[in-house]
């Protein structure tokens, strides 16, 4: 019985998330009422309040689920993907498969979400660069900020274009740029140690 209830709850919460994302495509979160969410979802307000206290709480849960799913997709056996090309492919395909959330994320409406995602992968990326490329901790942090800023900008433009370009081509270009920056910094570091 509880398994059926859990499935129904998940379906109901999914309806609320879908309704919220649909509404966010035409108005900001502070303009959306619980009543609108319920009407769009086809679920009554009492059911909404059984799970959430506000549209903001629903939004936070939606963001948290999205972040957790993205982080899970870039892990293999508990470790983060270290191949830049594979990572870019996974991230871009995830974005394309979660269009609505990504449009919201990259429209600037959800500013903390991208920070949370980048913070999640920071330690793994910088540690990999320090070990594999011989880059100092300070330079690895600088490189991460440089690359993540550029990657976010490229992905934002790609999402804004309606995912017009092929995912593989975007991932390939980003990989070349990231690896180029990494190699240049690594060569500078090795020259300074000589």
Image (spheres, helix red, strand yellow):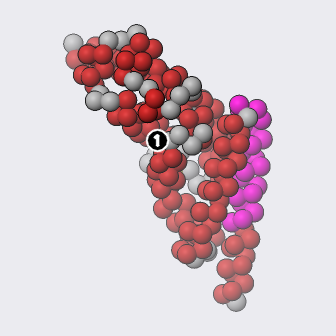
Q: Residue at x 56, y 68 (%)?
A: 141
**Quadrant in which the C terminus appears:** bottom right
* Residue 177 rendering spot, x and y as whole percentages: 75, 57
Q: Residue at x 44, y 37 (%)?
A: 63
Q: Residue at x 77, y 49 (%)?
A: 173
Residue 180 sits inside the magenta stretch:
yes
Q: Which residue is mark 1?
A: 67
Residue 115 sits inside the magenta stretch:
no
Q: Tell me which segment is drawn in magenta.
A: 162-182
In this view, 15 is above or below 192: above
* Residue 80 rendering spot, x and y as whole percentages: 51, 51
Q: Residue at x 63, y 35 (%)?
A: 93
Is residue 13 something one can see in this rendering? no
In this view, 31 is above or below 47: below
Q: Nearer the viewer, residue 30 or 101?
A: 30
Left or right, 44 with respect to 177, comes to left
Left or right, 189 with respect to 65, comes to right
* Residue 122 rendering spot, x and y as whole percentages: 51, 59
In this view, 145 is above or below 42: below
């Amino acid at each position: 019985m509880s398994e059926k209830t859990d499935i129904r709850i998940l379906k109901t919460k999914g309806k609320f998330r879908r309704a919220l994302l649909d509404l966010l495509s035409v108005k900001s979160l502070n303009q959306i009422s619980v009543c609108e969410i319920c009407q769009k979802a086809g679920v009554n307000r009492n059911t909404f309040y059984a799970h959430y206290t506000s549209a903001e709480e629903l939004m936070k849960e939606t963001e948290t689920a999205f972040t957790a799913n993205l982080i899970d997709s870039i892990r293999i056996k508990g470790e983060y993907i270290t191949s830049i090309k594979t990572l870019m492919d996974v991230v871009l395909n995830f974005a394309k498969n979660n269009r609505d959330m990504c449009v919201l994320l990259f429209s600037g409406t959800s500013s903390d979400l991208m920070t949370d995602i980048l913070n999640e992968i920071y330690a793994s990326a910088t540690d990999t660069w320090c070990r594999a490329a011989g880059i100092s901790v300070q330079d690895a942090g600088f490189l991460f900020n440089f690359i993540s800023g550029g990657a976010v900008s490229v992905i934002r433009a790609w999402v804004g274009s309606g995912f017009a370009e092929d995912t593989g081509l975007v991932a390939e270009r980003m990989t070349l740029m990231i690896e180029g920056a990494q190699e240049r910094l690594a060569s500078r570091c090795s020259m300074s140690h000589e």
